[in-house]
Amino acid sequence: MDSEKLIHKITESKPLKDSDELLDYINESGENTKEYIRYKSLWAMLQTGNEMDEETINDGYKAVKRKVKGRGNSILLNIAKYAAIIILAVSAGYMVQYAGLNNEIAMNEIFVPKGNRTLVVLPDGSKVWLSNGTKLVYPESFVGDFRDVQLEGEGFFEVTHDKDHPFIVNVGQHRIKVLGTKFAVVAYPDDDEVKAELVSGKIQFDIQSGVTKESYKSFMVKPMHSLVYDKTSGKVYESIIPDGFHDYWQKGTYRFRNETFDSLATKIARIYNVEIIFSDEELKTRTFTGTLSVDDNIYTLMEVFKSASGKPFEYRFDSGKIYIDK
């Protein structure tokens, strides 16, 4: 599709979701996606008749959001069995200053719905496996001294080594600094903790101390170790990662040891897009050891938990909810 036709498609009133030709073009390649975002951003600014103001700059970005079904391109590599990932292509929308120059930086926002996983390749070649209910925001290209991304949820990173441009994962008020390594981050906004698991390489976990916005307490994480920050108590815990316990990211399996039913229920709810409701607090404290696969049928999985429990319990499904009773 040439530029003239693309502009015509963008400026017509027909919604993007109703234009198969435009959707096919956008998903044909990463370059096509970038071209669409650029033209869409320009059209949005022309419609407002105003330049981007200082308030917009300070807010982070003013986005023109459109939902685009990811069907495989160089920006988003869908894993076949985990299809139906929704990509929010967030437009350029704001001005950022680097080295005294004004540069318009396009921001891409990826959201993975519950019940799905996907693989994202970043501009520097780094790879990120995103889990259920996760949002990742990253620039169209990395400029400046750092490679910054923002994560809400759960992701496994394989970062391309570049000692001159550290890779930083921002998780709320906290951040993780990287040079080149393999590690996982679990940072759902509604969870009580933030966790970093290092498989290989070296990472620094910076925890916002609360004194000032830029005040951090830094912790080095060793390979095959995890560091957990408890948001409520402010305490930090370190533990060893047993071999094979990080297979979830590439193999779709999650191994657990003496993990509470309540903690497992949170993960199951995200993987299968269900809500789990316990009728009794005692049920939440029961512990299990085993392996969970994303390919498991939810009904089969519940039967396995039922048979493995030292005490009997019953469960029932109703409108996307699982009720667990004694």
Image (cartoon, helix red, strand yellow):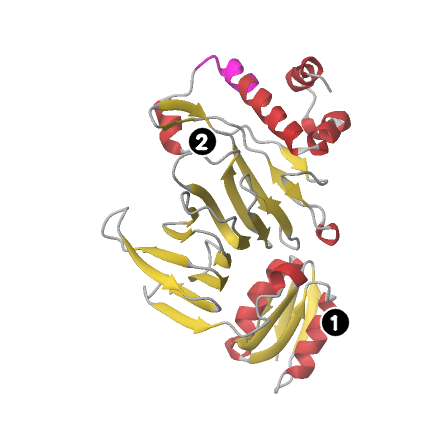
- Please give the range of residues in magenta: 43-50
Amino acid carrying label 2: it is: Tyr
Q: Residue at x 73, y 67 (%)?
A: 296
Amino acid carrying label 1: it is: Thr
Quarter of the image with the C terminus is bottom right
Residue with the most extreme right position: 20
Identify the disc placed on residue 61: 2
Element assignment for label 2? loop
Estimate the x, y position of residue 99 in percent, counting from the top left.
34, 27
Q: Earlier in the sequence, mark 1 or mark 2?
A: 2
Which of 259/25 is in front?
25
Q: Residue at x 55, y 80 (%)?
A: 287
Q: How many residues crowd around disc 1 within 10 Å: few (fewer than 14), some, or many (20 or more)?
A: few
Q: Residue at x 61, y 60 (%)?
A: 249
**Residue 230, visible in the rendered structure:** no
Which of 134/207 is in front?
207
Q: Quadrant of residue 111?
A: top right
Which of 179/208 is in front?
179
Residue with the most extreme bottom position: 310
Estimate the x, y position of residue 182 in percent, counting from the top left.
52, 58
Element assignment for label 1? helix
Q: Is residue 226 above or below residue 134?
A: below
Magenta stretch secondary structure, dominant: helix
Is residue 325 shown in magenta? no
Look at mark 1 in the image and give the residue it sits on. 300
Q: Quadrant of residue 313?
A: bottom right
Estimate the x, y position of residue 96 in percent, counting from the top left.
40, 28
